[in-house]
Amino acid sequence: MSDKMLPTTEVLSNMIITEVLDRWPQTADVFHNHAMACVGCAVAPFFTINDAALVYQLAPEQFVEELLVIIQKQSIERKPTNE
């Protein structure tokens, strides 16, 4: 998946936490909003987004959707203007 393509719900839910945070740093806000210690956690390089949601007893589908909103917003903000 290129940086220009947005992940699908299925792809994002199976991505490793650190990969998501590295690629889309603003997603850290979503983790913090749920009081998740994933940012900087020693197991973040080994757990998927789905794993994290389950560990914190969140609905995985809802958590992934929250991440996607931030990813889409970040993607729109990065688009170059034709000025």
Image (cartoon, rainbow, N blue to C red):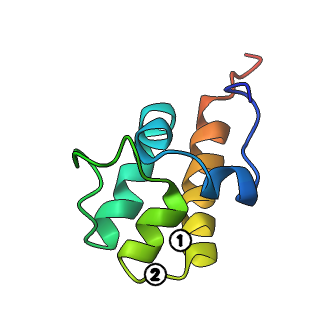
Considering the numbered disc 2 on the image, is that residue within a helix, a strand or a loop? loop
Query: Along the horizontal axis of the image, is 46 left or right of 77?
Result: left
Total labels: the figure holds: 2
User: Residue 3 at x, y = what percent?
Assistant: 67, 26
| 33, 14: nearer the viewer | 14
Frontmost residue, 27 versus 39: 39
Quadrant location of the C terminus in the rendered image: top right
In this image, 17 relative to 3: left or right?
left
Q: Are marks 2 and 1 in contact (CB under 8 Å)?
A: yes
Q: Nearer the viewer, residue 81 or 39?
A: 39
Q: In the displayed structure, would residue 70 be above or below residue 46?
A: below
Taking the spot 43% from the left edge, 52% from the top edge, the residue there is 47
Are there few (<14), some (14-19), or many (20+) residues within 10 Å of tag 1? some
Q: Position of residue 7 (x, y in %)?
A: 72, 45
Q: Residue at x 55, y 59 (%)?
A: 67
User: What residue lies at 45% left-to-right and 75% top-to-bottom?
Assistant: 54
Residue at point 60%, 29% (across, down): 78
What element does badge 1 sit on? helix
Calculate the distance from the C-alpha at mark 2 to the C-alpha at mark 1. Answer: 7 Å
Q: Which amino acid, by three-letter code, is at mark 1?
A: Phe
Q: Amino acid at mark 2?
A: Leu
Q: Residue furthest top?
A: 83
Name the residue that disc number 1 marks.
63
**Which residue carries the number 2 mark?**
58
